[in-house]
Image: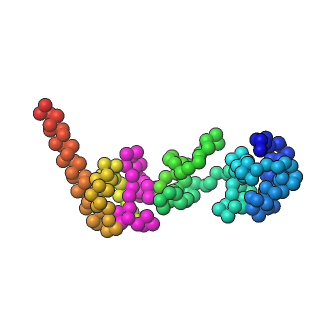
Amino acid sequence: MKIHRYTKEENAWLTENINLYGSCAEVHQAFIKRFYNVSFLSLTCHCTETLKLHRNNDGRFNKGHKGRELPLLTEKDGQNGVIYIKVKKSKKAEKITSYCEPYWIPKQKYVYEKFYKIKVPKNKYVIFLDGNRNNYLIENLYCINRKISVLMAKNQWYTNNRENTLTAIKLCELQLLLKNQKNNTEEVEK
């Protein structure tokens, strides 16, 4: 089947009538009867990518949704059970396709920054001390750098006990501090 170039009339019909049908398949059949025999994939891609008409998980199109921007402080589930919060509006020209900074940040980072009134540096991130990704209490959140995280993972010191995990982090911080001091001393002696 050759590539179909959608006309203004077809786009207007899709935009106006998309909500009259319960599923993508019904929209596809109605479109074929009225206009032209396009593939199901072509039509659904055109609706979602070009016209910004997005579908729900059940195959239905969201009523009235045409790529509008979500409001600030909207929470969304991301990968690996991480919840993201929208903290900045995107520019009209930008097409944001995933949860990325500076528009979306992990909820634990948001809570940490709001409580301590500081920005988490780029080389650090906020972890859950008890391993529970739904526990956003400030005493359960701790900011660590990547080197500490590597040491914690290598030694399998992440636990579901807040105090044990914090103790292991402090031990890693001490090890890195001693290692850096040793390296600095060796450089001075050379």
Q: Residue furthest bottom?
A: 161
Quadrant location of residue 95? Answer: top right
**View extreme (left): residue:** 189
- Residue 109 in picture, x, y percent from top left: 43, 55
* Residue drawn at (69%, 47%) of the image: 49
Task: Return the residue nearer the eye: 32 or 16.
Answer: 32
The reply to whether residue 12 is in sight is no
Number of numbered discs on residues? 0
Estimate the x, y position of residue 169 in percent, counting from the top left. 28, 57
User: How was this image coloured?
Assistant: rainbow
User: Residue at the spot x=64%, y=42% of the render?
Assistant: 92
Residue 126 % position (x, y): 39, 55
In the image, is residue 123 above or below residue 168?
above
Against 169, residue 6 (above or below) is above
Q: Is residue 182 visible?
A: yes
Confirm whether the magenta stretch covers residue 59: no
| Residue 110 colored in magenta in the image | yes
* The N terminus lies in quadrant: top right
Q: Is residue 155 left or right of residue 72?
A: left
Name of the residue lying farthest toward the front: 1
Q: Residue at x 18, y 40 (%)?
A: 183
**Residue extending farthest top:** 190
Which residue is located at x 40 percent, y 49 percent? Answer: 120
Decide: is 40 above or below 4. Answer: below
Please give left or right for residue 76 compared with residue 11 in the image.
left
Q: Where are the magenta residues, as a range?
A: 108-135
Q: Nearer the viewer, residue 87 or 105?
A: 105
Which quarter of the figure is the C terminus placed in?
Answer: top left
